[in-house]
Amino acid sequence: MRKRDMPSPDSADATARFVYQSQRARQSPAASRSIEIEKSIIRRLALRELKSMWVTVAPPINGDLDAVVEAFWFVEGDVLSLCDEAGRATGQTERLTVGGSDRAVASRLRKREWAAETGESAFSPPLNYSRHGVA
């Protein structure tokens, strides 16, 4: 038996539908379109297959360990785009060739991105010559 002050489940659903419809009616067409675009973007991000791997950006030198960074990417059509772990594109893109490896392209792009972030290239460090007194 239901208490007097409690609404029935049917009336609660009807109230929720009324509130939702009145909110939609108050929105301008531009705001409604903006919400639909946001939903579309969220759906597209959710459908992307994000791939990741570790990329060596500095080789081991004189007993030092190598340096690695993580690369995230997705492929849409024949274009590979680097992204962050949330799937937001970073702006680094490259068209894939037929039979080309997406891992190789992602590795190359991530190395370029890392060099731009740090301002250096770890694959061409200064040469360290031993001091043996021989000229």
Image: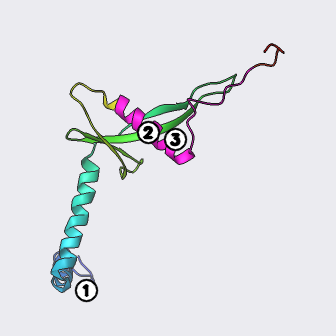
Q: Residue at x 42, y 47 (%)?
A: 85
Is residue 89 in sight in this rendering? yes
Residues packed near mark 2 inside 10 Å, few (<14), some (14 to 19) or many (20 plus): many
Find the magenta span and give its range. Answer: 104-129
**Which mark lies nearer to you, 1 or 3?**
3
User: Would you name the residue on which mark 3 appears?
Assistant: 115
Quadrant of the image occupied by residue 23: bottom left
Q: Within the magenta stretch, is there residue 120?
A: yes
Instruction: Answer with left or right where residue 28 lies relative to residue 133.
Output: left
Q: Residue at x 18, y 83 (%)?
A: 28
State the separation of the CA atoms marked 1 and 2: 65 Å
In this rendered view, identify the residue nearer to me: 33 or 125: 125
State the separation of the CA atoms marked 1 and 3: 70 Å
Image coloring type: rainbow
User: Would you name the residue on which mark 1 appears?
Assistant: 4
Residue 76, compared with residue 16, is above or below; it is above
Is residue 11 in sight in this rendering? no
